[in-house]
Amino acid sequence: MIYQKGFFHQISASLLACTFLVFGLSSCRKTKDDSDFVPKPKGFNRIDLPSTHYVQLLENHPYTFQYSSQAIIKPDTVAWAEPHWLYVYYPAYKAMIQLTYKSLDNNPTKLSRLIDDAYKLAAKHSQKASSIQNSILTTPQGQKVMLMRLEGEVPTYLQFYTTDSTKHYLRGALYFNTALKSDSLEPVIEYLKKDVIKMVNTLQWKQ
């Protein structure tokens, strides 16, 4: 009886040692698997961006410019729209560049008010914008253009205005009618930014 009791104690000790060994190996393997885990990057919808061909705006407005053949020119239909307000609409991207034109009539006070309004409209989005970058472009005709690039979850990602200081003032804003996040829209924003720069570089006022 003494021999059997010792024998069973020996088996129990052996089983206990094996159990600790199995759990130890399982724990090591799990830790290694966890350390090798890498989360998959966030995926976005693929957006194909074709090469751009530009055409001349031929409608009867106080200005003309070149715009992408991917776009359609539409009149601004909001209730308060004025003559010569336009949409440069991109159906493939559900995007538009809204253009608002004002005649200055050699009135410096009117010009100052319009410039203030342009900055106020951009500042309305400052709470949601992660940053607003202002830059001044000089066109081949020597005309200055203020370009405002907004980043973050905002309704408009690009705004600009330009003027000859005496007769003409033109403001533009890029909008998207889509639920996609700004990160996934970034390639399209940069694509359309080139169109905006082409637009202002070819802008000509009509006397």
Image (cartoon, helix red, strand yellow):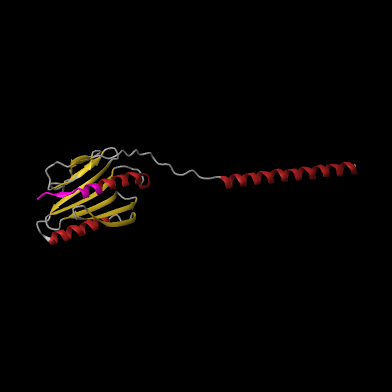
Q: Which residue is rendered at x = 38% and y = 39% of the image?
A: 46
| Picture quadrant of residue 169 | bottom left
Q: Position of residue 65 (x, y in %)?
A: 18, 46
104, above or below 53, in the image = below
Q: What residue range appears in magenta?
A: 197-207
Judged left or right of residue 198, residue 32 is right
Quarter that holds the N terminus: top right
Q: Position of residue 56 (x, y in %)?
A: 18, 42
Q: Give whichever of 40, 178 is nearer the camera.
A: 40
Q: Position of residue 136 (x, y in %)?
A: 25, 57
| Picture quadrant of residue 134 | bottom left
Q: Is residue 149 magenta?
A: no
Q: Which residue is rendered at x = 31% and y = 53% of the image?
A: 150
Judged left or right of residue 180, residue 202 is left
Q: Give whichever of 155, 55 is nearer the camera.
A: 55
Q: Position of residue 33 (x, y in %)?
A: 60, 44
Q: Is residue 201 magenta?
A: yes
